[in-house]
């Protein structure tokens, strides 16, 4: 467990993919696409989503969380990072699996955008019907 340099995992949500590395360190730091967490996610809600796996398992261990995230919107990216962190934490310590699984952090959210159909404006939006 402690002989590895870092613990890596991939998290996904919609079209967002996050490559996460957890490196044991003296203090907790987050680096997302070479930017600090507060700089990348200016909204407090998304910062809480990213930190939630650590608060859920109440880990006393400190990590440097390094993330490369691509695709999707800002909300999907936050959820993808959370998914990746949870998977990396499970790789770090298998005993954390129960708490992470009960919170739903290990399951990839399968919902994504529905495709556009021919003859419609969007996936389900239709042109206005007129009698004449």
Image (cartoon, rainbow, N blue to C red):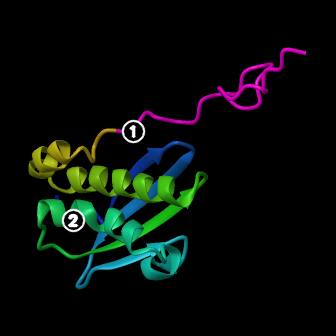
Question: Visible in this render: residue 113?
Answer: yes
Viewer-proximal residue, 23 or 19? 19
Residue 15 lies left or right of residue 126; in this view the side is left
User: Which secondary structure, mark 1?
Assistant: loop
Q: Residue furthest right?
A: 132
Question: Which residues are drawn in magenta?
Answer: 108-132
Name the disc covering residue 109, or none.
Answer: 1
Q: Residue at x 28, y 53 (%)?
A: 86
Q: Toward which corner of the image does residue 107 lie, by quadrant?
A: top left
Q: Quadrant of the C terminus?
A: top right
Can residue 6 be seen from the camera position used here? no
* Residue 95 pos. (x, y %): 8, 49
Which callout, 2 or 1, points at the residue further toward the start of the chain? 2
Which of the pair 85/3 is nearer the observer? 85
* Image quarter of the N terminus: bottom left
Q: Mark 2 and mark 1: span between their CA atoms?
A: 19 Å
Name the main secondary structure of what is drawn in magenta.
Answer: loop
**Of the two numbered discs 2 and 1 in the rendering, the one whose residue sits closer to the viewer:** 1
- Residue drawn at x 42%, y 69% as measured from the top left: 66
What residue is disc 2 on? 54
Relative height, residue 51 to residue 91 (above, below): below
Counting from the top left corner in percent of width and height, residue 41 is at: 48, 73
Q: Is residue 47 left or right of residue 52?
A: right
Q: Is residue 118 magenta?
A: yes
x 78%, y 27%: residue: 128
**Is residue 55 shown above or below 82?**
below
Single out the residue that lies furthest toward the front.
Answer: 132
The answer to whether the residues at label 2 and label 1 have Cβ atoms under 8 Å apart is no
Nearer-the-camera pick, 89 or 45: 45
């Amino acid at each position: 467990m402690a002989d590895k340099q870092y613990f890596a995992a991939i998290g996904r949500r919609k079209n967002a993919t996050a490559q996460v590395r957890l490196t044991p360190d003296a203090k907790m730091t987050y680096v997302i696409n070479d930017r600090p967490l507060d700089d990348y996610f200016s909204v407090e809600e998304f910062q809480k989503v990213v930190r939630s796996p650590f608060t859920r398992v109440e880990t006393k261990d400190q990590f440097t969380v390094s993330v490369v995230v691509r695709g999707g919107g800002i909300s999907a990216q936050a959820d993808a990072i959370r998914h990746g962190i949870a998977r990396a934490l499970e790789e770090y310590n298998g005993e954390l699996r129960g708490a992470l699984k009960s919170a739903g952090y290990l399951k990839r959210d399968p919902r994504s955008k529905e495709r556009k159909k021919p003859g419609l404006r969007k996936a389900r939006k239709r042109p206005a019907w007129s009698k004449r």
